[in-house]
Image (spheres, rainbow, N blue to C red):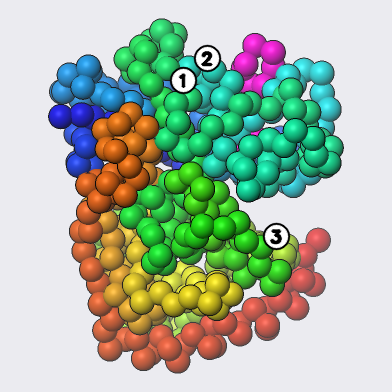
Amino acid sequence: MSYLIAIDNGSQSTKVSIVDEFGRVHASAQRPLRPYAHPRPGQVVHPDDDVWDSIAEACTEAMQRFIGAPGEIAGVGLCTIRFCRALLGADGLLAEPLLSWMDDRLGQPQWDDPAIRYVTTSSGYVTLRLTGERRDTAGNYEGMWPIDHETWRWPDSSPGYEAAGMRREQLFELVDPGAVLGHVTPEAAAATGLPAGLPVFATSNDKAVEALGSGLADELLVSLGTYIAAMTTGAEHVVDPSGRFWANFGSVPGRYLYESNGIRRGMWTVSWYRQLVDADLGELESGAATVEPGCGGLLTVLDWLAPGDHPYRRGALLGFDGSQGRFHVYRSILEGIALTMHRHSTAMADALGREFPELIVSGGGSRSDLMMQIFADVFARPVRRTRMSDAAGLGAAICAAVGSGVHPDWDSAVKAMVTTADVFTPSAASGTYARIAADHARVTEHTDPLFASLHP
C-alpha cells in the first residue's frame, strides 16, 4: 500500500490528510488560520508567519496520528491559497507578512524595496521552507505576474515584467503540476514531522486542485468555499471579452480551468451568521429544512465583500415582515448562494456555448444535505458530491500520486481515488425557485443606487 500526504492550505485553515492510493483517509489534522491583520486601509495580511506555522503544526499532528510505515509514504502534494504574494529577504524568510488575496496591493505593480530579494506565491514560499528550493508550481500564478499563459513559464523578455514591477531574477523556477518541487530537508522534517528526503510535488492553484479532487472533467462544478465560484475545464486559454468567465491554469499540465464570476465571501457569510446568532450548525440546518422555499419572501444579496467591478455594494437581507425567524434568515443565505451561482453559471455556459446536465458541488458547504438539495432544486438537475469532503486535499494527493508513479497517469489516478458519495435530485421546489430567480437577479438594480450613495 502506498500513501500520499496532502497539504491543503486554504483561506480559513490548513488541512493535512494522509490518504492511500484509493483516496481513503488514514490520518488528518486541521489548524485554523489566525484572523487577518490590516496594517493600513486596503492592506490585508496573514499575521506573522501564520501560513507556515499552521502547515507545520497540522503536518506534525497528522503524522502523529498515522499508524502506517513512514517508508510507505510516496510523496507530498502541496496546495496553498491562490492570489497571495510572499515577499522574501535574501535569507528566504518573509520580509513582511504574507499578502492575502484580498490585499489591494495585489492589483498593483510590486514596489521596489532593497529588503525584498524574491517575490513568489504562498506555495513558492512554503516550498522553500519545506525543501530549500526556489521552485514553484506554474499553476498558482494568476493576476499581476509576468507569466506566459500558453507556455506556463516566464518569458525570456516581456513588457510584463515592467508592468508587474518584478525582475526575472526575483522570481522562482516554474514547474508543472505533478513535477518534483524538491525534497523535505532535515530542518523542515524537524518542524513538520514529515520524513526527511520525502519528495514534494507541485499542484496548482487551490480552485484547480479542488476541481481535480472532485473529478471534474466536462461537467460543471460549484466550489462552496470562502470564495464561491463555478468551474469547468478546457484545453485552451481563452479570454471572454464580456467578462462572464475567465481562464485560469488547471491542475493537469496543458489544461485550463474556466471560472465564473463568484461570491467573494461565500461560506464565510454562513459562518458569520452562525457566530452572530451563536447557534449550533445542526440546529440551524434542521430548523431551516422546515422553512418553505423562498423563506416567506426573504431575499439575500451576498455582497458582504463587494466585487471589484462594483466596490460600493454591500450585503443585504430584504423582505422582512415579522413572520421570519433565524431559520428563515439562514435558509435565505443558502438560497442566495445557490441563486447567485446559478446566474453566474448560466452566464459562463452561454459564453462557452456549452450545456451542463450534471452538477458537482465541492467544498465545506457540500457537507450540508440542505445546501445540496437547494442546489439541486435551483439548478433543476442532479447534484453530486464526493466521498472526501476536502476535495482540494484529494486533488493534492492525486498530483503526488501521479508525480510519484503510484498511478501511471491523471485519468487513472482520478478514477481510482475520486468516489461519488451522494446524488441529490430536483424536487417540487424547483418551480418555486424558477419563479424567485428573476426577482433575485433584479434586486441589485434597486440596491445599487442606495449603496453607491452610501459609499465613502
Residue at 23 percent of width and 68 percent of height: 423
**Element type where label 3 sits in the image:** loop
Mark with earlier residue (2, 3): 2
Is 396 placed above or below 215 here?
above
Residue 285 quadrant: bottom left
Q: Nearer the viewer, residue 70 or 150?
A: 150
Magenta segment range?
84-95
For badge 1, the amino acid type reads Gly
Observer-side mark, 3 or 1, equals: 1
Q: Tell me the tag on residue 76.
A: none
Q: How far separated are the C-alphas under marks 1 and 2?
A: 8 Å
Mark with earlier residue (1, 2): 2
Is 123 placed above or below 311 here?
above
Is 272 placed above or below 47 here?
below
Side (left or right) of 68 relative to 184: left
Residue linked to disc 2: 132
Observer-side mark, 1 or 2, equals: 1
The percent position of residue 246, horizontal first and vertical second, equals 61, 61
Residue at 23 percent of width and 58 percent of height: 420
Task: For the N terminus, give its image quadrant.
Answer: top left
Mark 1 residue crowding within 10 angstroms, few (<14) / some (14–19) / many (20+): many
Mark 3 residue crowding within 10 angstroms, few (<14) / some (14–19) / many (20+): few
Q: How far separated are the C-alphas under marks 2 and 3?
A: 36 Å
Q: Tell me the tag on residue 308.
A: 3
The answer to the question of whether label 1 and label 2 lie on touching residues, with beta carbons closer than 8 A, is: yes
The percent position of residue 313, horizontal first and vertical second, equals 68, 67
Mark with earlier residue (3, 1): 1
The percent position of residue 12, horizontal first and vertical second, equals 47, 43
For badge 2, the amino acid type reads Gly
Magenta: predominant secondary structure element? loop
Q: Nearer the viewer, residue 63 or 183?
A: 183
Residue linked to disc 1: 182
